[in-house]
């Protein structure tokens, strides 16, 4: 994934670029939405280590109907695999 050629030069920009490219290759449509807090990724980013929050494929979190479809989990696993094998 050539994020530098896309103009993503900062560490944060490159991290997001890599995550978006891997999501697209895995068949998902990525979206970027700032998260105010509550995740380990937010804390690590605040401390200077750019850490995008990646999806899990789940829905209706922390409620009675929380669930995840196997197909969604497969796509998320593929995204992680692509991310790990394409970043150098």
Image (cartoon, helix red, strand yellow):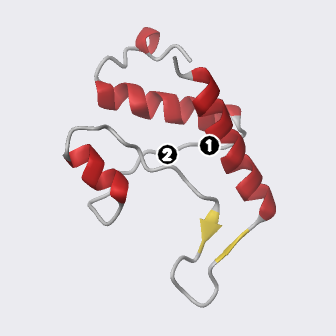
Residue occupying the point 63% across, 66% down: 58
Residue 22 location (% of width, % of height): 61, 33
Residue 71, compared with residue 85, is above or below; it is below
> From the viewer's perspective, is 3 left or right of 49?
right
For the residue pair 15 and 85, the one nearer the viewer reads as: 85
Label 1 close to label 2 by CB (< 8 Å): yes
Q: Residues within 10 Å of mark 1 (few under 14, many from 20)?
A: few
Q: Which mark is residue 37?
A: none
Specify the quadrant that holds the N terminus: top right
Q: Residues within 10 Å of mark 2 (few under 14, many from 20)?
A: few
Q: Quadrant of residue 47?
A: top left
Please give the count of numbered marks on the rendered protein. Answer: 2
Q: Which residue is mark 1?
A: 29
Identity of the residue furthest to the bottom in this view: 64
Q: Which residue is mark 2?
A: 31
Residue 59, compared with residue 80, is above or below; it is below
Residue occupying the point 37% across, 14% down: 7
Marks 1 and 2, how far apart at CA:
7 Å
Looking at the rendered structure, the secondary structure element under dot 2 is loop
Residue 7, compared with residue 78, is above or below; it is above
Identity of the residue furthest to the top in this view: 5
Q: Quadrant of residue 52?
A: top left
For the residue pair 79 and 40, the one nearer the viewer reads as: 40
Residue 69 location (% of width, % of height): 76, 66
């Amino acid at each position: 994934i050539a994020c530098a050629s896309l103009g993503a030069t900062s560490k944060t920009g490159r991290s997001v670029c890599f995550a978006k490219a891997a999501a697209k290759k895995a068949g998902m449509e990525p979206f970027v939405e700032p998260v105010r807090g509550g995740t380990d990724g937010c804390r690590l980013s605040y401390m200077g280590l750019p850490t995008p929050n990646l999806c899990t494929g789940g829905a209706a979190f922390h409620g009675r109907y929380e669930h995840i479809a196997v197909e969604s989990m497969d796509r998320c696993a593929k995204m992680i695999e692509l991310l790990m094998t394409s970043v150098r």
